[in-house]
Image (cartoon, rainbow, N blue to C red):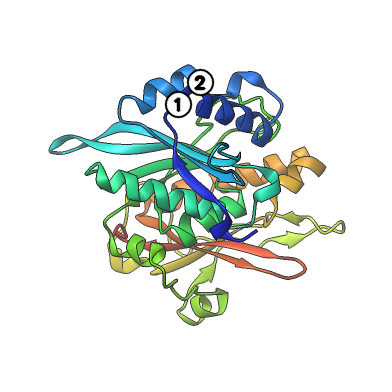
Amino acid sequence: MSQSTYQLRILTEAEDFLAVEELQRIVWPGNETEVIPTHLLISAVKHGGICIGAYTGGSTDDKGQLVGFVFGLPAIYHTPDGPRLMHYSHMLGVHPDHRSEGLGFLLKRAQWQMVRKQGIDRITWTYDPLLSRNAHLNIAKLGAVCNTYHLDYYGVLRDGLNAGTPTDRFEVDWWVHSQRVNRRLSRQARQQLDLAHYLAAGAEIINPSGLRSDGLPVPRAIHFPFDVLDQPMPAEAYPGLLLVEIPSDYLQIKQLDRDLALEWRLHCRQIFPVLFQQGYFVTDFIYLKGHPARSLYVLSHGEHTL
């Protein structure tokens, strides 16, 4: 299905949010307690929150089928000059039958447009750093950046996608007026840099993965190209670019081998908090098709919010 087939609507009515409830049960099956209820969605939207739905079909008398939504609400973050307003994007969901069709990108772009109209310059959200599909959307396509790693952010989640492993999360920042975000959301897509570009620029993979006999990727030794210290070193002491490899299909690993899934989680815990402490930002993501496919984060040293 092409992107032009979807109709995006700002959701405001109780019947809209009942459909959002039901779609949550399809996207994150397995536990009713993780569903955001209609009454909370209504309360948030009536007080500055935003919920946008994507529909297929429909007519003048029928809205059609809700197949995707994005929901967020106003929040604050703290700066040396005091608290400032931001938008916290809590949930993005797409029906399994409509994934890989660019719908997540359309919903986030609509959210970006609405938040800009509210006069807010920052959107933030969390996602599992081991999910390659989410990383490609959030970092490569939308232009979010990240230098925050949360250990077990949500505690125990009991839905079918999250049960069984710690809920570590990246917290990303989407600076809505920045050049990097505007370039990625423009009608003329930027050229996507691949692994060859970054290797030619001197980037190094600090944790190249291996393969088991069954084809599943396994984490290997980590090589930090600097001394890991409690305090950051002078900027010139750091390589400008680093690459960190993750599985291309972490959900498959969780289904086939929970112990290996936990091993990958603990592996990432040894990498990202260290790099963020030393001044690195996640600024791009690479997905290489093939057998096996490969997925790698690009980390750049220094400030990269522009």
Q: Amino acid at mark 1?
A: Glu
Instruction: Where is residue 142? Give x, y as percent.
Output: 44, 57
Quadrant of the rendered structure where residue 46 is? Answer: top left
Q: Residues within 10 Å of mark 1 (few under 14, many from 20)?
A: few
Q: Position of residue 184 (x, y in %)?
A: 40, 64
Quarter the N terminus occupies: bottom right
Q: Position of residue 170 (x, y in %)?
A: 48, 44
Circle count: 2
The amino acid beneath tag 2 is Thr
Q: What residue appears at the point 41 percent right and 68 percent down from the top-left corner?
A: 187
Query: Given the current orientation, which residue lies at the most extreme front position?
Result: 60
Can you see residue 147?
A: no
Report which residue position mark 2 lands on. Answer: 38
Give the distance between the C-alpha atoms of the residues marked 2 and 1, in whole angstroms.
10 Å
Using residue 9 as the reference point, say whether residue 268 is left or right of it.
right
Q: Which mark is residue 201?
A: none
